[in-house]
Image: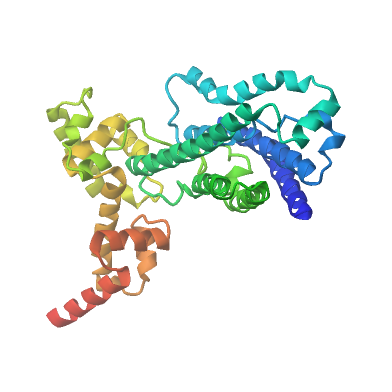
Amino acid sequence: MKMFLVAGIGLAVFIEFLLISKKNKTAPDTILVLWMFLIVVHLFLYYLFFSQEISNYPFLLGVEQPLPLLHGVLLYFYVSFLTRQLPEKRKVLVLHFLPAIAVYAYLIPFFFLPAEQKIEIYRNRGAGHELFNTLRAYAILLSGVIYVIWSALLLKRHSHNIREEFSDLEKVNLQWLRVLTLGLGGIWLLVILFRSDILTFAGVVAFIFLIGFFGIRQAEIFTPRRPAADGNPQKETDSQLAVPEEVSQSQAIADGIEPKKKYPKSGLTDELAGELHQRLIRLMTEEAPYKRSDLSITDLSSRLGVHPNYLSQVINQKERKNFYDFVNAYRIGEFKRLVAMPRNRQYTLLSLAYDCGFSSKSSFNRYFKEATGQTPSQYFATLTESQAVSS
């Protein structure tokens, strides 16, 4: 177990070095740096306890007590910053640190005790502080459960929101955030089920390996953002998951709620909405902007000279679709048109899909099956048979 802990600490330090050395760090990057530093400290302190070397460093006794109350907070901060779902009043964020601050405040007298007395209290499992230990244990359990669930709910909401913003979800990858949320959730599950420090910190080491593996696969976690043409860092990257200002309308539509109720303060009248809808359809039909795989609602609204929120409103109300489904419906329609032409039989289905705006085989196959109930190959086979019969 010692070597396992040492390996975990070494990898955590290496990840921390990569994060610190990253240029053009954003607020989420800074949160991840702080969180990884906290993990290194927490894991190192447990190693000292596990190896029974903590008595050689009595000044460190008590430092670990509030740390479990901070992991969930930092996960929530990281997820909420990346998905832009922070509360409007940023000052309230400090309230999340109050439980940890309260624990440190309680421990102030303990920190000033003689080393021998501090060691004796630990040997007697916190004798004289039973109520504090009980309250702290419940606070840790509640903190872990609440923040993991909270972060998961933010991700669920965000997965709906990005469909109002992007036409291709491959580059707006939620996998990294899911790994962090599920990984930390797994650690808290170990805490709840087994109440074993060894199993819990073994889970922490496994969590660090997950961070390293998935962080390297999603290169933006450790590498600097690509500079834009003007030399300044891009405001958005694949790891910075943009979110529209409006709450997603697609869920409301799916639930049968009248879309216009979602825009009570909109300045877009029915007449202007109808006009914008006609311009939108004309643009999609004549200029086929959907053939750009990275088309976003911001791009499309710029071409129409309107605010993205207005365009989102029109698509939701007039088409009863979110932006993602609206654009990909055009891509599917264009694919069907191309694949029906005999002169295109020399091309693969995937090459035709790329011409229509799909960015990958997986996204094409997935959306085509959702839209038609068939795989592209099944559709092509059916089409070929029907054309053969008609001829």
Q: As rendered, which of 2 and 206 lies closer to the eye?
A: 2
The answer to which quarter of the image holds residue 332 is: bottom left
User: What residue is shown at x 51% (from left), y 23% (from top)?
Assistant: 93
Q: As rendered, which of 162 and 1 lies closer to the eye?
A: 1
Expressed as whole percent of the image width and height from the top left, the position of residue 18 reads 70, 42
Q: Quadrant of the C terminus?
A: bottom left
Q: Is residue 92 left or right of residue 324?
A: right
Q: In this view, does 92 lie to the left or right of 8?
A: left
Looking at the image, how many numbered discs can be counted on the residues?
A: 0
Residue 340, relative to residue 112: is it above or below? below
User: What residue is shown at x 22% (from left), y 74% (from top)?
Assistant: 383
Q: As rendered, which of 341 and 73 lies closer to the eye?
A: 73
Expressed as whole percent of the image width and height from the top left, the position of residue 226 reads 58, 40
Q: Is residue 241 left or right of residue 309?
A: right
Expressed as whole percent of the image width and height from the top left, the position of residue 142 reads 50, 35
- Residue 127 visible in the current orientation: yes
**Colour setting:** rainbow
Residue 346, relative to residue 88: is it above or below? below
Q: In which quarter of the image is the N terminus?
A: bottom right
The answer to which quarter of the image holds residue 124 is: top right
User: What residue is shown at x 58% (from left), y 50% (from top)?
Assistant: 194
Q: Which residue lies furthest to the right in this view?
A: 56
- Residue 232 visible in the current orientation: no
Expressed as whole percent of the image width and height from the top left, the position of residue 51 reads 81, 46
